[in-house]
Image: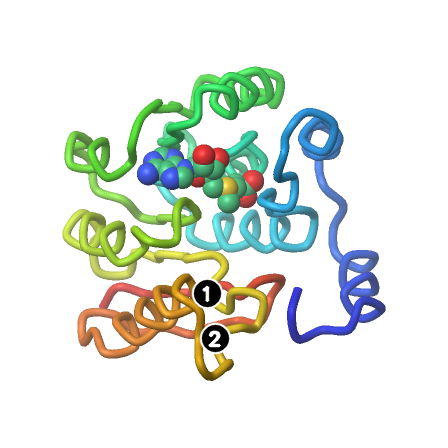
């Protein structure tokens, strides 16, 4: 959360629909058992992802960067009957924890967790995607976009997380990681195949619609 004061952020959370009990459990366990619990989407962003997914009513969702399964469960809530979500994670400990909670969430039969490097896994997936959530290593965001854009149809939505990078995208000079995020934002902005809006929610979300 970069541009909203803490109090406003808390107000937004308090007046947004509450997370499912399993999401609260994932959040607690993530804080107890992982080194970087801040990577988890959390209540406000998770509710946003759920609502977007419910509005799109996707048949096929791709998530790049599962972590402990929080956002996967949020996104799966919007799946159309018979729809599937494929989520990719290369850290075996994160994947093991996510598997446990995905089963517990009741979406186990609709979420497929693929373990490995998403840059290698995406080309192996044959289906097209109605909704994509990019939330893995920032260095590969441009590559992920290039890998998924031809697997999207007109009207598909791609969401990219952390595009404001703690607000550092407006700093000069920018550090190396911020340069990478800034380059990604400029790349998407210049791409005539999509229209996009950057929302200052949490660490910045890019909402990208394929034309
Ligand atoms: C920010 S966390 C994802 C958070 C999750 N989407 C959520 O909102 O709860 C990023 C995850 O991507 C994974 N990751 C990083 N690079 C990856 C890659 N090349 N392929 C697959 N997973 C990767 C990390 O291990 C980490 O678990």
Name the residue that disc number 2 marks: 169
Q: Quadrant of residue 184?
A: bottom left
- Tell me the residue at 35%/48% (across/down): 132
Q: Measured from the top left, where is residue 178 in percent x and y?
A: 43, 67
The answer to whether the residue labelled 2 contacts the one labelled 1, judged by CB atoms less than 8 Å apart, is yes
Quadrant where the image shows the N terminus: bottom right
Name the residue that disc number 1 marks: 163
Q: Quadrant of ligand 1?
A: top left
Instruction: Indicate yes or no: mark 2 CB to ligand 1 under 8 Å.
Output: no
Which element carries disc 2, helix, strand or loop? Answer: helix
Instruction: Indicate yes or no: mark 1 CB to ligand 1 under 8 Å.
Output: no
- Tell me the residue at 58%/36% (across/down): 70
- Tell me the residue at 60%/47% (across/down): 41
Q: Nearer the viewer, mark 2 or mark 1?
A: 2
Mark 2 / mark 1, whichever is N-terminal: 1
204 w.r.t. 61: above or below: below
Whether residue 93 sits left or right of residue 157 in the image: it is right
Q: Quadrant of residue 16?
A: bottom right
Q: Quadrant of residue 45?
A: bottom right
Q: Measured from the top left, where is residue 140 in percent x and y?
A: 30, 51
Which element carries disc 1, helix, strand or loop? Answer: loop
């Amino acid at each position: 959360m970069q541009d909203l004061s803490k109090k406003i952020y808390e107000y937004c959370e308090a007046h947004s629909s509450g997370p499912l009990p399993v999401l609260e459990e994932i959040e607690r366990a993530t804080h107890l058992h992982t080194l970087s619990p801040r990577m988890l989407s959390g209540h406000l962003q998770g509710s946003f992802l759920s609502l977007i997914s419910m509005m799109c009513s996707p048949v096929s969702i791709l998530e790049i960067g599962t972590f402990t399964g929080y956002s996967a469960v949020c996104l799966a809530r919007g799946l159309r009957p018979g729809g599937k979500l494929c989520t990719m994670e290369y850290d075996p400990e994160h994947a093991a924890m996510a598997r446990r909670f995905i089963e517990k969430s009741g979406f186990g039969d609709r979420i497929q967790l693929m373990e490995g490097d998403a840059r290698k896994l995406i080309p192996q997936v044959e289906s097209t995607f109605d909704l994509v959530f990019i939330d893995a290593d920032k260095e590969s965001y441009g590559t992920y976009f290039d890998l998924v854009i031809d697997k999207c149809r007109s009207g598909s939505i791609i969401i990219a997380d952390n595009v404001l990078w703690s607000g550092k995208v407006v700093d000069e000079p920018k550090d190396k990681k911020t340069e990478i995020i800034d380059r990604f934002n400029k790349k998407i902005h210049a791409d005539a195949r999509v229209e996009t809006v950057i929302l200052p929610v949490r660490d910045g979300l890019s909402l990208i619609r394929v034309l």
